[in-house]
Amino acid sequence: MRYTKLWILSLSLFLSLFSLSAKAALTIEINEGFDNALPIAVVPFANENSGLANVSNVVAADLKRSGQFKPLASNQMPSLPSELNQIDYNQWRTLMIDNMVIGKVSQMANGLYQVDMRLINVLRKEQMMGKRWSNVPAKGLRQVAHQISDAVYQELTGKRGAFNTQIAYVTMVKGSKQRFYTLEVADADGYNAQPLLKSTKPIMSPSWSPDGKKLAYVSFEDGRSKVYVQSLDGKYRKMVAGYKGINGAPAWSPDGQKLAVTLSKGGNADIYILDLNTNRLQQITRDRAIETEATWAPDGQSILYNSDRRGQPQIFQYFFDTRDEVRITFEGKYNSDPQMSPDGRYVAVVHGSKGYHIGLVDNQTKRFEVITDTFLDESPSFSPNSELILYAMNKGGRGQLAVTTTDGRFSQTLQVKNAEVREPAWGPYSAE
Amino acid sequence: MKTLSKLAVAVLAASLAACSTPPQKEMDAILDGDSMQDTAPGLDGRYQIQQQDLDGGATMTPVEVYGPDGQLLTTIDPLDGMQNIGDSDPLDPRLPEYKLLNALHENVVYFGYDQYSVDEKGMEVLRYYADVLAQDPRRIAALYGHTDERGSPEYNLALGEKRAKAVFDALVVLGIDPKRLGVSSMGEEEPAVFGSNESVYAKNRRVEIILK
């Protein structure tokens, strides 16, 4: 028990300014198992019921969704320990469980909650980690659970977890006379969906500011595409590009000071960089072909974009310092909508050959691989830890979202009841 | 102004019926104002103008303003304050659509996959509409490019514009003043037909010519 240490953490509460009740939550469906996933037992926490968010369930679901863990079902557990001295290590060793998470939820005198968790190495019979969250309101318990998942993931894989993050997406409901579009933000597991904007005209292409506090997006609310920036708390909203022609494809620079956008005010779709402080525009491409869907390399030194200057959409990279343009994709006749992983290793694209799927260019090996096999796959977006890709696809005639590991071996779908879902964008790590 | 009054219905509908009651202040602004300025499309809880189903050349129906509970609050002539429709921006969403009675051609030009050139069948349609525009100099036209649902939405937005531009160029070659034409793209966002097969896709790869 040398490592027994309780870290006291205080939860900084994310105060939602939306009074609107949450929309129908995204429901998640796991599609494939992961053969070499690590077995783990997330034991139901003591006192976690009574109508509150079930912390251990959220943690187990998070770990399973990563594709790297295989949580033991709670009905197969030989006992339900919540303290170190309650663990019979041999019981768990015979089940081939090397790691387990135990904990408890308790109500404090002030009515708020305290959550304790411990990560146990069963083989060495010792605690690897212990943490405590105090003064947690009931609605903050899911967030604590995601932080527990992050901590466990980091300890066991050595990689940062992205469970306590958010996603943005657009839902569309067909009415009899018109359509209803909603830009929503939800937790990465689909819970706590909040509407940011509702319109009867299309909404497209949400892009997160690097601090996670604003979204840039395209709205057709006054008849044609214009680019807007809106804060998540709804207090700030501004049209930043409403030039003649199309205004689209906003992409926030890593330093948060600029937006790459597509404008056709010069006669056809070209990439521009809009300085958000001065409103000054810098034109990057001047080709007569379509150039759009710019995205920034994580170091901010280059952008990638789609150009059909060779007669079909392909991905190019433009370096700001040398002004060099390099073609990135060569496989097939249709590669569009590039996204570079935050670690810089991969470029995800929409690849059209037999159908439309998500393809990955590996910048290390220079290999290209198609990693999805669903229908009409588009809009890839990396998790902030570069481990997963969120994308839009069509299943049963309906737009849905899916998440896949970068090797394509594990995937899950997220759907909204009675609505089409599309245009997903995975948000950054929340500033702690 | 007489012909203008033949323009069809534009209805000011409370946007997003499911939304909350609009603040009283904004409702007052709409009721007090004669011009359309106060009724520009807005965000949730405000009002939006909708072009409704049109019967071509029918008599003019004024804009109707409904309260959140569906009760008719007031009616406004949508063309009050507008000097001459021919001087307006063809893309102005407040302008009502004008539909031809017994038109010889559907107001749509179709395109091939990932293509933005007008074929001979499309040119036939455009010669007809160029003639319509030539015969009635007050008319203006908005050209909306569309794509099928496949591929990435932003590329499709740009592709739809290329198609609308191709139609624009053809109409200009046919003698129409560029000022009377507006080019816009809806990308893949507003399919004419829903579904996921080639015959559906072919109907969605199009430019619609909206006369106003």
Image (spheres, coloured by chain):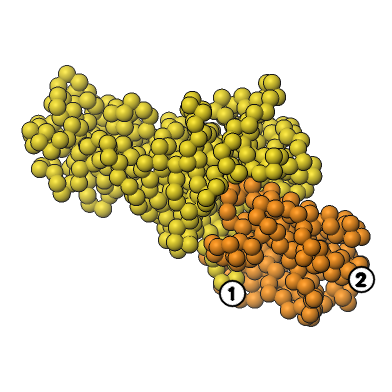
Are tags 2 and 1 found on a single chain?
A: yes
- At which x and y percent is residue A326? 64, 28
**What residue does disc 2 label?**
B135
Q: Residue at x 64, y 47 (%)?
A: B155
- In the picture, the disc for residue B117 is none
Give the residue displayed 61% in from the left and 36% down from the top.
A315
Give the secondary structure at mark 2.
Answer: helix
Chain B palette colour: orange
Q: Indicate the position of residue A388 as horizontal and vertical percent values.
A: 42, 38
| Residue type at numbered disc 2 | Gln
Residue B182 pos. (x, y %): 80, 57
Q: Is residue B181 visible?
A: yes
* Residue that badge 1 annotates: B70
Q: Residue at x 68, y 21 (%)?
A: A321
Q: Nearer the viewer, residue A198 or A414?
A: A414
Q: Amino acid at mark 1?
A: Gly
**Of callouts 2 and 1, which one flags the residue occurring earlier in the amino acid sequence?**
1
| Chain of the residue under the numbered disc 1 shown in the image | B
Q: Residue furthest top?
A: A2
Residues packed near mark 2 inside 10 Å, few (<14), some (14 to 19) or many (20 plus): few
Q: Nearer the viewer, residue A415 or B44?
A: A415
Q: Is residue B98 above or below residue A303?
A: below
Residue A351 vs residue A212, the one in the foreground:
A351
Mark 2 and mark 1: span between their CA atoms? 41 Å
Residue A235 position by quadrant? top right
